[in-house]
Every structure is written in C-alpha cells, then in structure tokens.
Image (cartoon, coloured by chain):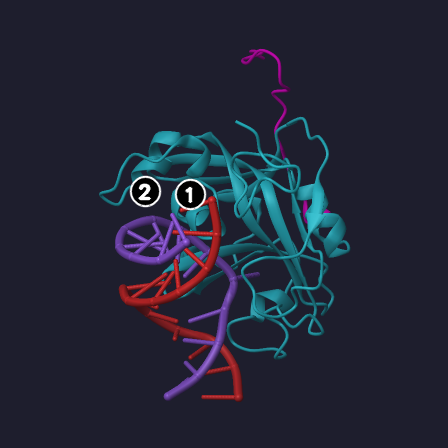
Chain colours: A cyan, B red, C purple
Amino acid sequence: MGRSRAGASTRRRVLPRGFYERDTLSVTADLIGKVLVHRTPEGVTAGAIVEAEAYIGESDPACHAAPGPTARNEPLYGPPGVAYVYLNYGMHYLVNAVTEGRGHPAAVLIRALEPLEGLDLMAGRRAGGRRAIEAPSLCRGPGNLTRALGISLAQNRLPLTAPPLSIEDWGMPVGDVVWGPRIGIRVGTDRPWRCWVPGHSSVSGRRVPIDGGRT
DNA sequence: CGTTCGATGCACT
DNA sequence: GTGCATCGAACGT
C-alpha cells in the first residue's frame, strides 16, 4: 500500500446507488465536494462539484419531467444514480444525476466543477482558437464542464456508480454551502434549489453575493 | 463595469 | 414552428 499523496485522504469511494435514492435537495447538498470523474481513452478528467441545482418532479415547471413522460426525459423516470444528459440550445450538453426513483422523476444538474485531474486534456477539449482558458474557468458552467470532461449524449443513461463515468468521494474538505434561486431558466425561478460553494472561483453566474467584492 | 444578441439542434406543441 | 436548465463576443455607459 503506497500512501501516495500527502495531506488529503487517498481513499476514493464511488457513491453507491443508495446515495441518490433520497430526497433530491439532500442529494444536491451532499454532492457538493464530491468528484465527477470521466475515464476515456484520451485520459482521465475529474473535478469537484461546487455548484448544482435540483429539478424535482412533474410539478416543478423547470424540470424536464413537467410535461410528463416523453422520449427525452425517460431517464428521469428510471432508477436513481444514472446520468441524464441532454443537448441544450443546440450546442451544449448538460449532465444530471437522476435521484429519488420509484416513479418520482427528479435530478440534480451539475453546474460547475473545480478541476482536479486532467487539466491539460480539459484545456484541449475546451480550446476553440481563442486565448488560453484559466484553470478555474475550465469547468465553470454546465455546458463548459461537459465539454471539458468529454460528456455528450453517448453518456446518457450511464450509471454513475461505476466507470467510465462516476461520482466519487475523494475526501475533499467541504465547508459551508449556500442556497439561492436557480439560474438560466424562464420558469420556476422562485424555488431556491441552487446550491454552491460561496466565493468559489469556479462557480458560474455572479459569484460575489452581496457584500461587494474588493480589490 | 453593464446589457444584448447570435449560434445551433432538436424535443415538443 | 417555437423555445430552450448556455456561452461568449460585441457593444453601450
């Protein structure tokens, strides 16, 4: 047993299906600090979740289950612990973790990661002939993180409880999280179901809450 | 700083 | 045909 790294725990536990088989707001909060990992032939990319949103049930107008069962949202009605990926605005893939189960369609949208592993690969996938992307921006925003990790419709319905796509506990220290309204949606903005690490440089949207940001 | 707006594919009405 | 769970360039203040 090589104790490889100094400091942080080296134990890496893949979250089991039972983790997701709970009320969605609890899962959302508990996903903060967990690590989304994608293992591909190109290499491994991974990042700690620092921002997520809950979408809960057919009564949530912003949830894809709002219209009832359709071809696209079918994964929401399936077992929890599965990836729900879809194409938005014709160009961005968004990844969710399906929760609850038992015919109760709900999911957590992963909105931002703190890059931990495979930063060069992320940068290569993000590159678009523009200037170099700073590390905190590589996985800032739901469309950006899927691109950085190489997640597309090919990963839709994959279990998150085993490679190649998994969410793991790497023993990352987690401080306080805060809640606020979900962003980027036209309906259901009244529900404070967005959860994030306050002040984190990889969180999307306006990251300086109230006090005014200094410097 | 701030806001506006085009890109681009497809699920759903 | 309409409208997105987005992003970033372009422009205004």
In the image, A148: left or right of A127?
right
Q: Which residues are magenta?
A: A1-19
In the image, A13: left or right of A89?
right
> Residue at the location (27% across, 37% down)?
A131
Q: Quadrant of the N terminus of chain A?
A: top right
Amino acid under disc 1: Leu
- Point out the tag, 1 or 2, that comes first from the N-terminus: 2
Q: Residue A47: tell me if it is visible.
A: yes
- Residue A10 is covered by the magenta coloring: yes
Residue where numbered disc 2 is placed: A125
Amino acid under disc 2: Arg
Callout 1: 10 Å neighbours few (<14), some, many (20+)?
many
- Labels 1 and 2 touching (C-beta < 8 A): yes
> Residue at the location (28% across, 41% down)?
A127
Q: Taking A173 as reference, is A80 above or below it?
A: below
In the image, A91: left or right of A203?
left
Front-lying residue, A44 or A190? A190
- Residue A9 is covered by the magenta coloring: yes
Residue A149, disc: 1
Q: On what subunit does the disc labeled 1 rest?
A: A
